Image: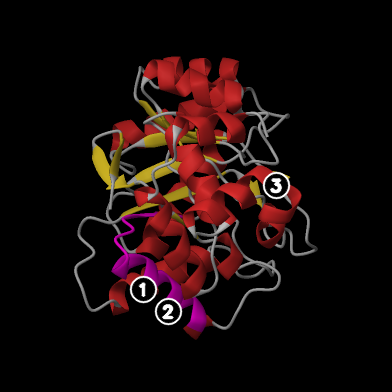
Amino acid sequence: MQQRTIGSRSVSAIGLGGMPMSIEGRPEQERSVKTIHAALDAGVTLIDTADAYHRDANEVGHNEQLIADALRSYSGSTDDVLVATKGGHLRPGDGSWTQNGRPEYLKEAAKASAKRLGVDAIGLYQFHRPDPDVTYAESVGAIRDLLDEGVIQMAGISNATVAQIDEANEVLGGRLVSVQNQFSPAFRTSLEELQHCASIGVAFLPWSPLGGIGKAGDLGSKHDAFGQVGEAHGVSPQQVALAWELALAPIVVPIPGASRPESITDSVKAADLQLTAEELDALNNA
């Protein structure tokens, strides 16, 4: 598969988002493990997770543990797989999401994530979402300390503005390697952040790159241009969307969520889909 770069690591151009396998509506664990194994079989070497990807209040880190178990049970080598996790978001168990950006919390959360993942140092750790009750530099400072202490190997942020990207990179001493923001055919608000990442050489990881859980299947009908280009190539609108995102900049690494082997197997084919300039222009203006 086509490769892209996150910091010092080369990863597959299409990653796997783990959230659908652990939150409401999640499948049984056997199918989730098969989905992760199918991704690995297809050449995926970036798996995105978070300690907040769980359903019930008493199962923090459900997705991290699931991914660790799936990697251990995989028959092939997983040495080149980068598992990226996040901290700073919480799920009380009532379906809501809350924030905790306090430095002491983030440091403990990262160490707990490393333990669940079974690693000495987390490959990529990202501050999940800004906490309005804590100054941004203070939260990112905790990520810097984790980096300096060797608890994490690389540092990223998520759900950030252009100003926060620059602030985080300054706090981290120029060591910011990734920004994970929502971006899809239906949600293009983060295009400015994507372009800014391209200008400073920081990887941009679109989350919900197909429109989100429960909406990805409607992509072709709600966005005609993607369906039309898909028909012309004999592929799914979802493949077209991911190929379009990859074409926006060489720093883009989409992380489509999946809970079925068939979904991620289809998604990874986007890395080899070549779109014409005319098609890209139509999709940019769709």
Was residue 196 drawn as part of the magenta stretch in this picture?
no
Q: Secondary structure at mark 2?
A: helix
From where the camera sits, is residue 209 visible? Answer: no
Q: Quadrant of the C terminus?
A: top right
Q: How many marks?
A: 3
Residue 187 in the image: x percent, y percent? 69, 38
- Give the residue pinned by disc 1: 37
Residue 171 location (% of width, % of height): 44, 18
Residue 46 visible somewhere in the drawing: yes
Q: In the rendered structure, which segment of residues is drawn in magenta? A: 31-48
Residue where numbered disc 2 is placed: 34
Residue 173, by quadrant, is top left
- Mark 3: few, some, or many residues within 10 Å (few <14, many ≥20)? some
Q: Residue at x 51, y 65 (%)?
A: 63
x and y, in percent, of residue 254 in the image: 47, 45
Q: Residues within 10 Å of mark 2 (few under 14, many from 20)?
A: some
Nearest the camera: 58 or 215?
A: 215
The answer to whether 44 is drawn above or below residue 285 in the figure is below
